Amino acid sequence: MSSKVNRHHYHHRFNAQSFPPPCPHLAEFRARNGSMPFRSLEDCLRAKPPCGRAAIRREPSEVPRCGACGESARPRLYACVACAAISCHAPPELSHAAAHATSMPPGHEIAVDVDRAELFCCACRDQIYDRDFDAAVVLSQSTTLKSATIQSAKPENLCKRRRVDYLPWSPDMRDRVLMESGSSPLVYGSDMPRGLRGLNNLGNTCFMNSVLQALLHTPPLRNYFLSDRHNRYYCKQKNGVTNSNAGGKRNVGTGDGNGNKNARLCLACDMDAMFSAIFSGDRTPYSPAKFLYSWWQHASNLASYQQQDAHEFFISMLDGIHEKVDKDRRKPHNQGHGDCCITHRVFSGILRSDVMCMACGFTSTTYDPCVDISLDLEPHQGGPAKSASMKTHPSCNGEADSLNSGQNCGISTLMGCLDRFTRPERLGADQKFFCQQCQVRQESLKQMSIRKLPLVSCFHIKRFEHSSIRKMSRKVDRYLQFPFSLDMTPYLSSSILRSRFGNRIFPFDGDEPDASNEMSSEFELFAVVTHRGKLDAGHYVTYLRLSNQWYKCDDAWVTQVNENIVRAAQGYMIFYVQKMFYYKASENQVAL
Amino acid sequence: MRNSVNRPPTPDAAEDPGKEPTLQEIINIKLIESGEKERLMELLRERLIECGWKDEMKALCRAFIKKKGRSNVTVDDLVHVITPKGRASIPDSIKAELLQRIRAFLVQAAV
């Protein structure tokens, strides 16, 4: 029936919208009569082939007329659900349907369009929607049509895609008894929140420790592993681990001492073991030796005691978990939707890249999945003197204020970096793009935007510059200011496109992001991985935000710090989580 | 639907001596009785979708709703807004085709 674009758009619309609430007259009608009147209308409906459009059943020769004026040629005739009186509705001159509703006793406000089988409220003078009525329409159509496909399966769609409202839950007495009988309560000191535990440095592994600390407190990831969604014991059983050495791989004596001889590698299982250890309540520093060993096996080119790049480790680790978890299902590279594994569900978003031909305006669009966004710092402004002064006054409030006034004094901010990331960039004369319309290489304009936001956004600041021209690498120490709360709306594809056409309200086909409500564009900062020092001799430290307190995780040492320390730190990887996943501090600690 | 005691008496508009059915009404009745009206409606729907008229109207409605806000719009508003534009933008070929069909119907119905 409708074109492909329409159906796709319609689909999207129903995804985003919830079922409209009933008007007061409909609510009253349903309260008085229940759902029976609409269901019984099924007998009065007739779906006419070939396309199965539903209408009120009538004799072939019967001509419906308005009860009040006798007109039969009106575009809309409504039949009252209560008394079957037919009225016309032709605003603005006359509406006998509205007159019917007011003249009759209450209960006659709801009517059905005789030609289209759609509900109408004569008092509100507007179309209304009811689930049971739609169900009746669908049933009437499906019994008439021979083919199994249902054209307008509204209720089914809604049932599948309707989001269930969030209901807060707290355990009642019976639940508590059940929980207590199956487990033993953990003993927690009240000074520090749960899950804060130092990680021992196993030999220049601060790059790994810092990223692990951030991931251990990534809310969706933490919830996944703590709720046993990847159980390392079941995973081992399922993959048939035997005790004998397989393929000649021996325990190479890294000193972990647990005598594990299995050659099966699963980074997710190691993560699961780490989560259990970290959240166990034990405050002594933990040694992630098993994880390190597994990661070495996965990324053997990086297996050494040298300092590595934390971002490189992050990517490699996500990839490792994806590979091991996804091995059975073998999904193709469809990571944008995050259905393959937990890491992609949490971190992967979709970037949109538009290349516009400067000559004819033809735009070529591509979508790429991404697990993080790498941002360039601004090219040199203001020189080393400025950055040095920032570093020596880290906790001064006055500095913090001047930092907030941003661009004017040449301070780089995260939002500035994102602005630059999504700014249209002119591809130079040496990078001419082949335009499909002009059929020749033309100068083009490229613009990036975010089509789909991930649950957790990781911003990687490119501080390590490897210049192939000058054959040297250097570190950019430039300070970057980052906010604690971030609104990503201006960087979404919809916003970018809209501004391209200059604030028009014209809809762009297929471009509404999946999460189009305001809630999912707001992000909260929860972890910052910082780097201090030189390119080849530096140290990574992670700052974690738990219950609105900041904690510094420097390998095995975890201390509480003031937020200004964090603001002044040199951010390298900055982690934001969607606001709805970010738990604020609660007054009452639940104790089992 | 129950047989409600509240049902008003069936109107006898057609038999009202004071009111002669107009030519328009007679044609309409004939169209409906023979089932031709439904066929013409189907044909019109098909043609309007083919030429993109339906999509244009949909876009106009969307723009209007976006401007006024989803909860401030009724069906009447929408119909009022897009009717003049809709009528004006129907391609002539479709008008011609339908008029042709109606003419043909009248010729064979008058016999």
Image (spheres, coloured by chain):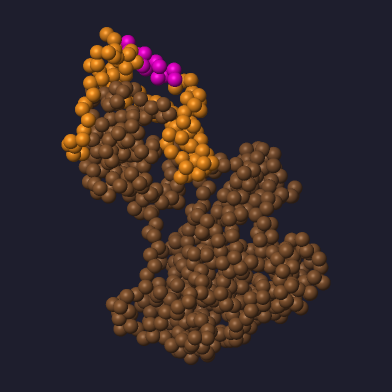
Chain colours: A brown, B orange
Instruction: Give above or below for A315 relative to A55.
Output: below
- A321 and A392: which one is in front? A392
A196 on left or right of A470:
left
Residue A86 picture quarter: top left
Q: How many labels does the image show?
A: 0
**A437 relative to A467 in the view: left or right:** left
Q: Is residue A75 left or right of residue A568?
A: left
Q: Inspect this view and state whether residue A149 appears.
A: no
Q: Is residue B107 at least partly visible in the picture?
A: yes
Q: Find the magenta span and give its range.
A: B95-107
> What residue occupies the far top of the structure in this picture?
B111
Q: Compared to A68, does A561 lie above or below?
A: below
Residue A40, horizontal then vertical, whole percent:
22, 42
Point 52% across, 90% down: residue:
A284
Tell me what residue is drawn at x 40 percent, y 72 percent.
A229
Task: Tell me residue B94's x, y (percent).
Answer: 44, 22
Instruction: Please identify the quadrant where the N terminus of chain A is shown.
Output: top left
- Vertical relation: A332 (above or below) A250: above
**Residue at 21% in and 26% down:** B10
Q: Is residue A185 left or right of residue A218?
A: left
Residue closer to the observer: A27 or A468: A27
Image quadrant assignment for residue A262: bottom left
The percent position of residue B71, horizontal first and vertical second, equals: 46, 45
**As displayed, is residue A366 above or below residue A457?**
above
Q: Which of A180 and A589 is in front in this view?
A: A589
State whether the magenta stretch is mostly helix, strand or loop.
helix
Asked if residue A568 is among those painted magenta in the image, a careful observer would answer no
Residue A16, horizontal then vertical, whole percent: 45, 51
Location of the C terminus of chain A (image quadrant): bottom left
- Residue shown at 75%/77% (left/top)? A393
